[in-house]
Image (spheres, rainbow, N blue to C red):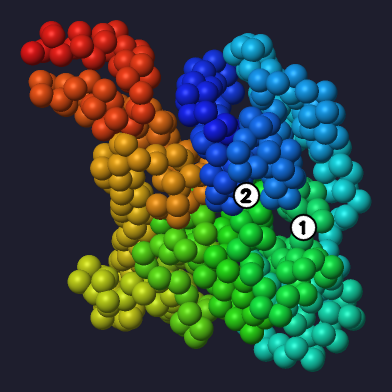
Amino acid sequence: MYRILIVDDERIIVDGLSEMLKEKLDAEIEVYKAYSAPEALEWLDRIRIDIVLTDIRMPEMTGLELQQAIVARWPRCKVVFLTGYHDPVYIQASVRNGAIDYVLKTEGDPAIRSAIEKAIKLAEEEVANSETVVKAKAYIAEAIPVLRNEYFLALLEGQESREKSRSAKFRELAVALDPGLPVYCLAGRIDEWNNAESPSDKALYMYAVNNILEEFLAGAVKAHHIVYERNRSIWLMQPPAEDRLAKAEVPDWSNWIRYIRGSVEQIQTACKQVLKLPCSFIAAEAPTGWESLATRFRALDSMFLQGIGLGTELFLTDGFLPDGGTPGAGSETERSQAKRVQLLEKYLDEADRDAYFEMFRQITKLDPDRAASSIALELYYSIVAMIFSYLNRWSMMAEVTDKIPLQRLVSLDSHSSWDDARRFLEHVSEHLFERKMNVRNKQIYDIVKRLHDYIESHLSGDLSLARLAELVYLAPSYLSRFYKQTTGKGISEHIADTRLHKAKELLLQPHLKIHEIGLQVGFPSAPYFTRFFRKMTSLSPQEFRDLNG
């Protein structure tokens, strides 16, 4: 998915180019429109843009000045200039500043389309060419030094850390982060392994993902990568020491965080294309102090373990909090010492139903002489403790009391046999999995309904993927995949269907003029509305009205 921003102070040119690119380009694209340089800057401050097609002579700001603003915000953005003037001075200046092409308006649609296709190809090559670097770094850097990793794992688990002792530890372990500056947290997960079976293969993949992130954010951040689960890790980030943000007495993090979030979508794409690994990310809304790091970490990680977080290739922010809450300090009960019961808890958290019940049946299959022994007693209450831990951490205790007889759960003697007790625990586990999936399904339903309601009531307004993503706290690229996976069709297709349905409804009202109907369903000019309607129905709006009048 590539985002293209068209900038020109002539509305008819912007609208025409937008329609042409949507129809003629084979690549999957989102097209955004700006009718002035200031409006273009608003888009650039709002989302990552991959390609800008801009007029070079505009009233408020020249295209060259806009190009400098683009590079400052999104260094990898490709700029194509479009102008009615063949001016060698402008051409030379644009090329020096990094423009990839310069197209005269008189050259027509084919030349413009060719320039955009060239920009897309360059963007694809940048991702592909990073493969050699990624592989080299992955094999050289076998692991993060053990002591450094253990120290940061302890911080994530809530170990107290004062700035003075933290500074000494950072110097000792050669940590690049500033112990006195807040950190920005980005949690990541490899959703599926690419035929990686051994722990060493998986470790290499984890570090390859880290290397991709470092490459895309080079110069913009200093980061520390911590692997805390077999498929999950977290990055702690700060601006470089020489950056004005790091030096500011009261720093404004918004632009820096926006850049990181926009780059994460490219990192996700690179992981999929280069490593063949689908990855998910959850970004913090704001930086956090070291004293609050453990709380922030638990909140981010918990989002991977319930509701929509159980999906794949997601990109969320912690502004989107799943129903069911997040674990707080001291919310967990004491865990069982049995390693396999710990695995049960892990599989339950991750909604890995098959692995959970396979392990459950293995550990609860006891010989007849052991079924009445203290081993059965220990095993039963270990599983019960795990279940209570789960209920407490996800604030489910109150809602399950009507469905799970807790008195029977806490007493092995209430069961007639070990097999009866085992079946009861299995039934309780089934209920927990069912509830977990119900929460996810409800969240999915709520997101889709909110999108549909908004689209239906804003047909003449901003229905860009960026706006819809902001509405439901999802990243635009993830929203596009999420919607298609959930509904079976693209979100742009749903918008078109909704516009068509509303247009047909309004065309049955003879007092409304056709151009007024076009405006109401999101088409600024009658020709665009007529072309859309004919494409969808093989009829013009007037022909439809005549047939149904």
Please give the label number shown on residue 262.
2
Q: Quadrant of the N terminus?
A: top right
Q: Residues within 10 Å of mark 2 (few under 14, many from 20)?
A: some
Quick check: 438 left or right of 114?
Answer: left
Q: Secondary structure at mark 1?
A: loop
Judging depth in this view, the residue of 227 and 114 nearest the camera is 114
Q: Amino acid at mark 1?
A: Ala
Residue at image position (59%, 23%) is 27
Q: Which residue is mark 1?
A: 220
Q: On the picture, is 196 further left or further right than 537?
A: right
Q: Earlier in the sequence, mark 2 or mark 1?
A: 1
Q: Which mark is residue 184?
A: none
Residue found at the far front of this picture:
59
Across and down, in percent, residue 539 comes to 26, 8
* Closest to the observer, 238 or 326: 238
CA gap, disc 2 to disc 1? 13 Å
Can the viewer see residue 87? yes
Whole-percent x and y of residue 420? 30, 66
